[in-house]
Amino acid sequence: MQSAIDLRNKLKSIDHRGYPAYKDLKGQYDFKDYVLSIDHVQGDPFAAPSRLSVRVKGEKAGFPSAFYDTHAKRVTLQDHLTRLFGREVSGGSFQAKGSGKSGLLSVSRCGQQVLERTALRVNAGDIILRFEAGFPANGRTINARELEKMLFDILPECVRRSLYYARIDKIKLKQAICLCEDQEFIRKKLPELSLCAFVADGSVLPRESGVSEKPMKGAVPFKTPDSLKVTLDLPNKGMVSGMGIPKGVTLFVGGGYHGKSTILQALQNGVYNHIAGDGRELVITDKTAVKLRAEDGRSIVNVDISPFIRNLPSKRDTAHFSTEDASGSTSQAANLMEGVEAGSSLFLIDEDTSATNFMIRDQLMQEVISAGEEPITPFICRVTSLCRDLDISSIIVAGSSGSYFHVADTVIQMKEYIPYDITKRAKEAAKGYPAMSGDEDRFPAYLDKRCPQPDMGLRKDDRIKIKTMGTRELMLSRENVELRYLEQLKDQEQTAALAWILKFAELKMMDGRKNLKQISELLEKQMDRDGLESLFERGDISSSLARPRKQEILACINRYRRLRF
């Protein structure tokens, strides 16, 4: 390993040379308190920034082991330190001057959710931080003096103020770890209490705007109806009361703009832990929950949708259903069955984004169009057996149809963002109307083991290109994968990770023998053990990946149009 003095001498030797001479800097340098590694050097000052990393030994970093002795606490510590370093480098970025991206210093920008990222990893107390830097130039001529200022003046102080326990605000870190412990405590309590979600009193659910995840100022705080109140004794916060949503079928109803979709959005995001001040810190949902919706035009490959759709024209096989252009009902049926395959224990559904004919067929339609002429068995006819036989609960938002009153175990009315338990009133009113469920049989048998074949064309491609477009879309070797309707995908770094995971699964795991469930479990075990970094064969690891859930991994694979079985 070279020393920091060696790096300084190299900088002097390449000053005023052509930009490619920066590549001579690649390597590791001992700065005594930490090791700086220059992993990738950009081709010119206008290209994607260079990638660097800093390694700090555990004994020097000094963080107590109690802050990373569980996976959840380790991820919280990593998230907290990434945010600290981000704040430090934001003040140092572009202090060095030059062309293009000269002087840039950046690290992953963390949102309201606490996510595991490649930007920073804590391993037995040791810290590795990955970030980006724009190497300075005048035109395309190296300005080594400005890079020297970045690496020897700005960066060391940023590292010391964010990666050393002795230098950071210990109270704020302790608060973050305590909040994580409380969140995980609630999440583990849910199955014990036969709950699928918990919303603490005082939570702020509305967001600032449609493009902001921050809490709305002046929003009505959440208040639990007495009949659904659950009180928990959290390890750090102590006694906390809130609404426990029981397992089974729960229906949210109410007038427009009264908060039905708002609470559903809070619940779908409750699969993640949130930072303090978010307002949804103690909105905790079953971690396997999946938001279902119609998704016209999506690709479906070999999915058994026969529990919901049979006897299609031209005798199409719905037990092995495939299409390049799904309808609303077939896409929602496929999304549901793929959710079952992914191990979900909770489905979240908003009628506004659902296919009407998938959700319900009213009495008049049944009289006009006989059962033999209708290939769709609507969700209302399966929702009870889905819970009874597969132990999968459902939370449904309905604003226009009361038919689900018959099958709902709990009915909650949202009125001016406050929930009211109206189960008894709704059930009493429903007695005057015919039930439309007919849900008495067991949930039908279905095929749940799909073994994808390897894509030999992809394996022969020695230059597989990866590109992402926010959380909407990714591209793997010129094949686009639409992700815009995966509403629980929260960060563009998760999309980037999905692209690498899809590539890894295609090249290393799909062999025609392992089914998708087995593949997802192997991926989870590998990432638990070795992190997202293990998806890379070389040492040059992306600094901008965030780990998605197993549910989004399988959803991505299922939308890959070159998937074959």
Image: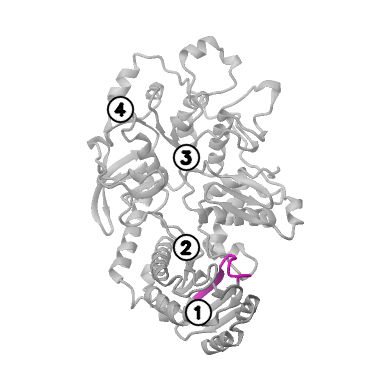
Quick check: 399 left or right of 492?
left
- Which mark sits nearer the N-terminus, 3 or 2? 2
Inspect the image, locate mark 1, and give the three-letter code of the amino acid beneath it.
Glu
Q: Tell which of 285 and 559 is nearer to you.
A: 559
Name the residue furthest front: 139
Q: Is residue 18 left or right of residue 91?
A: right
Q: Nearer the viewer, residue 227 or 474?
A: 474
Q: Nearer the viewer, mark 4 or mark 2?
A: 2
The span picked out in magenta is 42-54
Whole-Å distance between the Cαs marked 4 and 2?
A: 45 Å
Front residue of 255/301: it is: 255
Callout 4 touching callout 2 (CB < 8 Å)? no
| Disc number for residue 423 | 4
The numbered mark at residue 291 is 3
Residue indicated by mark 1? 146
Q: Are marks 4 and 3 in contact (CB under 8 Å)?
A: no
